[in-house]
Structures are given as C-alpha cells and as structure tokens.
Image: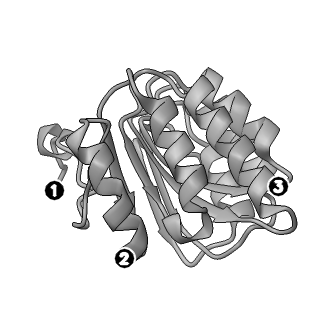
C-alpha cells in the first residue's frame, strides 16, 4: 500500500470502508477532511478507530453508525476536538428507539464545542426523539442541520427550534463546502 504523508483531504466514492481505512492508516496525520460515499457498513469500528488514531486534525468526516459502534463514536467525539462537521450515515437494526435515544445522548454530551454542522437522515428518528435532542442542544453552538433527505413533517416541527436559535435547517447541498478550500494552494 502506498504512503500519503501530505494528504489533507480524502474524498472517495463507491469504496469499501476497509480500503478507505487502509488509506487513512497510511497518512501522516494531516487529514482534516474525510468524505466517504459508501453503502458499506462492514468494518465500521476499524474505520472509526483509524479516524481517531490517524486524523488528529480532523474537522469534517463521514461516519457510519450502527448498534455495534456507539462506544467508538464516544471515543471519536472525545478524541477529535477540532470537529466542525459530521455526516452521519446510520444503520439501525432492532430496538431503534433505544438506540436513537442513546445515540443523541452521546452526541449532545460528548460532541466537542467546535461541532456545529451535522448531515443526517432525520426520517429514522421519531419526532419525540428529535425534540429531546434539540432541547438538550440548547446552550451550545448554533447547529446547522443538513438533512440527507427532506421529510416534510420533520421540517415543520423543526421551525420552532429555528425560531429559538437552536438550529438552522439547511435545505441546500453546502454541507461539504468549506471555506478552507479557498486557502489551499493547488499545485499544477
């Protein structure tokens, strides 16, 4: 496997998490953005551990969350204190309600103060669970919420949290747009 000591941004499409993990493990800790488009939920624990161990400067990341890797999510949120945005791809199996409540509890209680952007599919959560999450987010940084798929009843119920200044419901595709790109000097 090749080494990528100067790699800062990793964007991969249609790739397994095991291959993405190998690439991350062969970097020198300079990655600040990891965007992975995949439907692969195999090796999620190893993938998250690679982010924790090899990406000390991570600011934006795609995370694949399921019932088995919530402890790794805790470790990531504690370890990665520069996180500004996370794309959450969630696969919930049995006991969805318990898992979603535990997931949001972890997110609210352990997310670094720098986190302010979340891209997520809200349809898998009950309105009650989302209400609890937004109520508990009060007092934190204004949350920019980017739904992967718009769900009408959710967007209607979120308006009160927008009015309160807890969230901004972003209907555009700008989650991955980062001003830092403007500062990068690209080599010819």
Say whether disc 3 or disc 1 marks the residue closer to the N-terminus: 3
Q: Quadrant of residue 107?
A: top right
Q: Quadrant of residue 92?
A: bottom right
How far apart marks 2 and 1 lie (CA) works out to: 45 Å
7 above or below 148?
A: above
In-front residue for pair 173/17:
173
Q: Residues within 10 Å of mark 3 (few under 14, many from 20)?
A: some
Q: For mark 1, what is the residue? A: 188
Q: Quadrant of residue 170?
A: bottom left
Residue sitting at x 50%, y 21%: 81
How far apart marks 2 and 3 lie (CA) works out to: 27 Å
Q: Secondary structure at mark 3?
A: loop
Q: For mark 2, what is the residue? A: 152
In-front residue for pair 116/20:
116
Q: Is residue 52 visible?
A: yes
**The furthest residue to the left:** 182
Task: State which quarter of the image contains the N terminus.
Answer: bottom right
Residue sitting at x 36%, y 76%: 152
Q: Secondary structure at mark 2?
A: helix
Q: For mark 3, what is the residue? A: 67
């Amino acid at each position: 496997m090749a080494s990528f000591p100067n790699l800062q941004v990793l964007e991969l499409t249609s790739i397994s998490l095991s291959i993405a993990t190998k690439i991350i493990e062969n970097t020198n800790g300079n990655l600040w953005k990891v965007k992975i488009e995949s439907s692969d939920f195999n090796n999620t624990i190893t993938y998250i551990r690679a982010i924790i161990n090899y990406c000390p400067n991570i600011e934006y990341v795609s995370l694949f969350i399921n019932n088995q890797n919530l402890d790794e999510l805790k470790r990531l949120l504690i370890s990665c204190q520069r996180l500004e945005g996370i794309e959450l791809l969630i696969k919930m199996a049995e006991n969805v309600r318990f898992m979603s409540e535990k997931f949001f509890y972890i997110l609210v209680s352990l997310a670094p103060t720098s986190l302010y952007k979340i891209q997520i599919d809200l349809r898998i959560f009950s309105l009650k669970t989302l209400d609890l999450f937004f109520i508990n987010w009060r007092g934190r940084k204004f949350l920019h919420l980017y739904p992967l798929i718009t769900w009408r009843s959710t967007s209607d119920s979120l308006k009160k949290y927008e009015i309160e200044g807890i969230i901004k419901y972003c209907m555009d595709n700008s989650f991955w747009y980062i001003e830092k790109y403007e500062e990068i000097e690209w080599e010819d």
